[in-house]
């Protein structure tokens, strides 16, 4: 909501800090060619800066859905324009013109899934700075399903330490995700 004020440079910087990588993530998931990634991301951020003030939260549309629709529309328009210029063949880009970001739509489901993955990875990155290398390794190994005894032997620590470090990291990750969601989700 703060980013809707075009004079609040700090809010816009925060917005870009949280969402720029998500935009790149969506573009990668859309199989956008690497040559086009930076240009498209810049176009998307400029459009968002210009039009974010028009976003109004509605009961059935979350901001990330609106954002996903903006990304999809800009990508589609970009490739349509490029096709007219004969610089790129649009058939190489799979964009469904009929996709609409409504509650329960495929686009909404994809965006929600990608957002959850992105937020978890973002929180994990932030968490790494608050824990020892051993604690992070314990947590990552436990996420991959490695048994506590095997983690303990591998890292030369006690099984009790494995459980303690794992639980601390898990608690911190949950708190980190909550804090980030409070800042960025409407």
Image: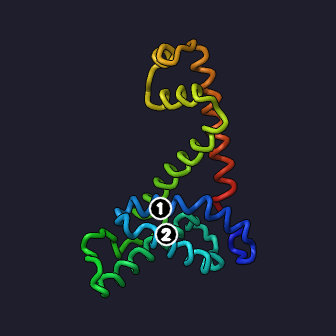
Up-down relation of residue 26 to residue 159 (above or below): below
Up-down relation of residue 120 to residue 72 (above or below): above
Q: Is residue 92 left or right of residue 12?
A: left
Instruction: Residue at 50% x, 73% y: name it.
Output: 70
Q: Crowding near pointer 1: few (<14 within 10 Å), some, many (20+)?
A: some
Q: Is residue 62 left or right of residue 103?
A: right
- Camera-side residue: 21 or 87? 87
Instruction: Give residue 80's position: percent from left, percent from top.
Output: 34, 82
Disc 2 element: helix
Instruction: Give residue 163's position: percent from left, percent from top.
Output: 59, 20
- Camera-side residue: 82 or 35? 35
Q: Crowding near pointer 2: few (<14 within 10 Å), some, many (20+)?
A: many
Instruction: Give residue 136's position: percent from left, percent from top.
Output: 56, 31
**Quarter holding residue 9:** bottom right
- Hey, which residue is sitting farthest bottom in the picture? 84
**Quarter holding residue 16:** bottom right
Sequence-wise, which precedes: disc 1 or disc 2? 1
Residue identified by numbered label 1: 24
Q: Would residue 104 be visible to someone looking at this image?
A: no
Q: Is residue 1 left or right of residue 112?
A: right
Instruction: Residue at 46% x, 68% y: name it.
Output: 38
Residue identified by numbered label 2: 41
């Amino acid at each position: 909501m703060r980013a809707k004020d075009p004079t609040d440079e700090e809010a816009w910087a925060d917005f870009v800090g949280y969402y720029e990588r998500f935009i790149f993530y969506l573009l990668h998931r859309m199989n956008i060619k690497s040559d086009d990634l930076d240009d498209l991301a810049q176009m998307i951020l400029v459009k968002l800066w210009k039009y974010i003030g028009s976003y109004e939260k509605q009961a059935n549309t979350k901001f990330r859905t609106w954002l996903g629709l903006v990304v999809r529309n800009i990508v589609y328009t970009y490739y349509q324009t490029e096709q007219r210029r004969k610089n790129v063949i649009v058939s190489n880009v799979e964009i469904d013109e009929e996709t609409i970001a409504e509650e329960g739509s495929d686009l909404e489901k994809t965006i929600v899934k990608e957002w959850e993955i992105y937020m978890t990875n973002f929180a994990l990155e932030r968490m790494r700075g608050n824990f020892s290398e051993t604690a992070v390794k314990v947590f990552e190994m436990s996420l991959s399903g490695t048994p506590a005894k095997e983690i303990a032997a591998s890292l030369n620590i006690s099984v009790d330490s494995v459980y303690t470090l794992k639980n601390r990291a898990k608690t911190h990750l949950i708190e980190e995700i909550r804090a980030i969601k409070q800042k960025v989700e409407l």
